[in-house]
Amino acid sequence: MKNTLYKISIAASLLVGVAFTNTACTNDHIEDVEYLGAFSTENFFRNEQECFYALVGAYDVMRKNAGGFENMVTFFNAGSDDFYAGGGSSTDGAGIQGLSNYTINPTTIPASYWRDYYQGVSRTNVLIQKVPLADMSNATKNRFIAEAKTLRALYYFDLVKMFGNIPLILQPFTASDDLYNVPQASKAAVYSQIEADLLSAIPDLPVVVPADQKGRLSQGAARALLGKIYLYDNKKAEAAAQLAEVNGTPGGTSQYGYKLVANFASLWVTNNKFTTESIIEVNHTNLGNSDWSFWGQGNDEGNSICIMTSLRSYTRNDATAPDLVSGWAFNPVTENLFNFMQGDPRLDASIFNAKALKQSGKIDYSAAYMDSGYFLNKYLPTKDEVTTLPGAAELNYRQNYILIRLADTYLLEAEALNGTGARAQALLDAVRARVGLASVPVSLQAIKDERRRELIGEGHRWFDLVRWGDAPTVLASRGFKPNKNEVLPIPLTEMTGTALHQNPGY
C-alpha cells in the first residue's frame, strides 16, 4: 500500500475516457499516470474502500460546472441575454466568444463539453457493473449504485441539453469493443433512461446526508433533479409531483430539511456552504494546491468563475469599496439585465455596479472586451479569500457552486403547474417574500421573470430560454438561429471516422 494518489487518465477515443481516482492509504502526494488503452478493473473494486475511491472519481466530474476555463456557468452565461462573453478581446476563448455571438462551429466548440461528461458516464458505468461484486454490505452497495445512477443521469442530462441526439452508453467498454460505430440515440430514449435511473436510485439514497458527508447525493437531490428533468421532457404533471415532494409547504421546511435562507446575499458568502437552501452543491477547495500544470486538465479543485468574472486591474481608492482581487473580466452584465433589475432587492447582491463606483472615484479598473461597467457579484473574490497554501491563487478559490437550490425548485414546480392555481401562487410568493417583495399574480411570464431575477449568473438562463422556445426572439440580436442554435455542434474531433451525425446547421 503506497502513500500515493493516482489519477489514471485513460486515452479517450471516440466516446469514453475512462478515468477514476484510485487511492491507497493516504494521499501524501499526487502523481498523474497516463495509461493508453483499456483500463483493467480486475484487481480493483474489491471492497468498500476501493469502490468509494472510484465513487469519488465519479463525483469529480460535477466540478465541470464551475471549474476550469471551460466551465458550464461562464460559457452558457455568455450565450444568454444577461451577459456578454467579455474577457481580454474578441479572441479570448474561441468557444465562449463563439457561443456569445453564435458563430460557434465544430472546430471552435471546446471538446471538453462532450469528452468530460462522457468520462463521467464511463466512470458511473464501471461502478454500476463492479460494485455488486465487491466485498461490503448490501446497504452500502445499494447506496453506491444509487449515487452512480444519479450521477449518470445528471451527466446524460447535461449532454442531451447541450447536444440533442447523443450515444447512449450503459456498459463499460473493453479493448475489443468497436468505439467508432456507436449510434446516436433519440432525445426521447435518453430522457427515458435518465428518468429510469433516478426512479431506481431514489429509494436507496439517504433521506438526509450526514453532516460529515456533505456534497453526497440524497433522496431530495435525486427527486429535485428528476423533477427538473421531467419538466425539460415536457412531463409537467410528473415534474410537479416530484418537486412538491422536495419543496413541501412554500416558505416552510420540507421533509428533507430544505428551507429558504432568510438572507439572499448570504448564499454567496464563501464560508456559508451547504445551507438549508442547497439541494445539489459542488464543493470547491484550495486544499488541492492546484497549479497551472493542472489547468485545462480538469484536475484543478478551485472555483474558476471567481477569477474569470472579476474586474481587470481593479484598484480600491476608498476604504468603503470592496477589496476585490483583479481578474479576467469575463461575463460582464448586459445593460438590459441591469435595467431589468432596477428596484429589485437582489440587485446589489447579484450585480456589482463598477460604473457608479468608478464615476465616484471610489475604484478604478481597466475596461475589457464588451465592458458594460456591470459585473456578476455572486462570485467576485475578495482579497481575504486568496489562498495562503501552495498553488496558483487564481485556481484555488473555495466558493462552492450550488447546482440546484430551493428557490429554483419552487419556481420549477410553479412552472410545472402551468403558472396557475393557489400552490403556484404560493411558490412564487415565497421566493419574492424572502427578499421583501409583494405578491404579484402568478402566470408563466411572472415565473419566467422571477427566474431571471433570482438565478442571475448561475448558469440557467440560456437553457431556460431554449426550453421555453423564447431563444429565437430574445437572442435574435446576438445571431441565434432557430432550429440550429438550440443545441451545440458536436466537436469535430469526436466526429472524425465515427458513425456520429452532426447536428443540423453545423
Image (spheres, rainbow, N blue to C red):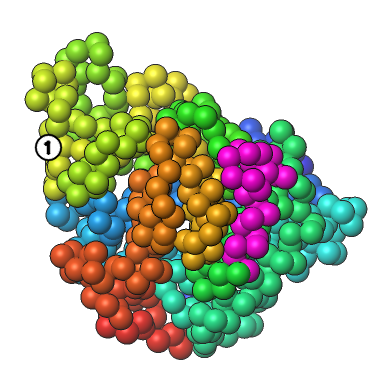
Q: Is residue 228 above or below residue 403?
A: below
Horizontal side, residue 302 vs residue 281: left or right: left
Q: Is residue 155 visible?
A: no
Residue 58 in percent (x, y) is at: 62, 55
Q: Is residue 112 above or below residue 60?
A: below
Residue identifier under label 1: 367
Instruction: Say what secondary structure mark 1 lies in.
Output: loop
Residue 244 within the segment the image draws in magenta: yes
Residue 472 in percent (x, y) is at: 26, 71
In the displayed orientation, state which residue is furthest to the top: 319
- Residue depicted at 44% across the width and 77% down the height: 164
Q: Nearer the viewer, residue 199 or 308?
A: 199
The N terminus lies in which quarter of the figure? top right
Q: Nearer the viewer, residue 296 or 319?
A: 319
Residue 343 in percent (x, y) is at: 27, 36
Q: Is residue 218 above or below residue 384?
A: below
Query: Quadrant of residue 54 in the image?
Result: bottom right
Kind of residue at disc 1:
Ala
Q: Is residue 145 above or below residue 395?
A: below
Residue 217 within the segment the image draws in magenta: no
- Residue depicted at 39% across the width and 24% down the height: 386
- Residue depicted at 57% across the width and 73% down the height: 235
Q: Is residue 188 visible?
A: yes
Q: Give the magenta-colored segment's residue range.
A: 238-259
Q: Nearer the viewer, residue 153 or 432?
A: 432
Horizontal side, residue 361 vs residue 503: left or right: left
